[in-house]
Amino acid sequence: MSQATRRLTDGTEIPLLGLGVWQVPDGPACVNAVRWALELGYRHIDTAQAYGNEESVGRALRDSGVAREDVFITTKFYPRRRGDPAAEAEHSLRRLGVDQVDLYIVHWPQGGATWAWPGMEKARELGCTRSIGVSNFDVDELAQVISAGSVPPVANQVQFSPFEHRRGLLEACERSGVVLEAYSPLGTGRHLGEATVTQIAERLGRTPAQVLLRWCVQREIPVIPKSTHRERLEENAQIFDFTLTDDDMAALDALDRTRGTARARERKWW
Ligand code: A2P
């Protein structure tokens, strides 16, 4: 499996493909998904304090026999209770059973864009994480955190797919040296049956999931599809051995339902 990576502004390399474990229950389902992913060659796992499954991610990592330094691990600070991002990072490390994560992200800008950032910087200074970033931040929120902090976020993880092609936000991220990461790249499964996607997949002899994921990695956008099925994990990893034509990319781009928004989400959900 390809280990294509993208360099973040602080020099850290993030693998373009990762496994996202949002909505994977703690326990065997999560342990199996992560273990299979690592067996299949995934080297990037994306979890969060709010997902409640960091312990399973850690168990699978230890059981896999894959060296810790070969896997890029992201977790996210849960801002709902306010709290101290640095102290919460220590708790995450204990649950994951690792000394450091690779990327620690503010899960969403609840309570304002900037209050958590000093604690995120402290988590980095303490060595709890190599890099710090944000998630679900709009252009304005991103600008606020960049100007407030001494270390800028390296990534902004948002819902992103041809149907949620947030061009305004993507362009702002690229201008600021922030890598946009795509979560829910399959629309949590809803986009797989869409006609344009299935037609391109048929023509190329690929699957709809592969087409949607290829659309991201062909733009060097790190992408973290979720699956708890081994055969789908395998399918989702086979996206580095084909290319979408310019026409395919344009047809997929045209599916955008956000009108190229600069927003990170349709509405606040907290
Ligand atoms: P499952 O976990 O049962 O395999 P997203 O990454 O956009 O959140 O989408 C995740 C959803 O898409 C999950 O419901 C997952 O189901 C499903 N899924 C993931 N990969 C595939 C695939 N290759 N084919 C069909 N469904 C998939």
Image (cartoon, grey):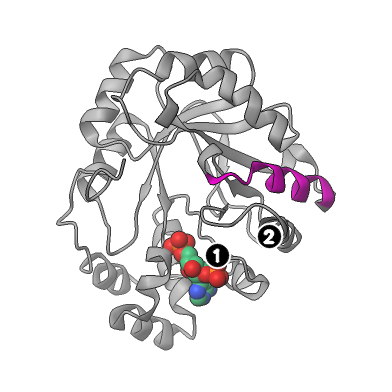
Residue located beneath label 1 in the image: 240
Q: Which of the two residues, 11 or 102, is positioned nearer the viewer here? A: 102
In the displayed structure, 95 sits above or below 248; it is above
Q: Which one is in front, 28 or 264?
A: 28
Give me the residue at 58% from left, 57% from top: 24
Nearer-N-terminus badge (1/2): 2
Quarter location, residue 228: bottom right
Q: Which of the image's four quarters has the C terminus? A: top left
Residue 77 seen in this snapshot: yes
Label 1 to label 2: alpha-carbon separation: 16 Å
At which x and y percent is residue 46? 56, 46
Q: Specify the quadrant of the image occupied by residue 52.
A: top right
Query: What residue range appears in magenta?
Result: 51-63
| Quarter of the view holding residue 128 | top right
The residue to which callout 2 is attached is: 37
* Three-letter amino acid code of the residue under disc 1: Phe
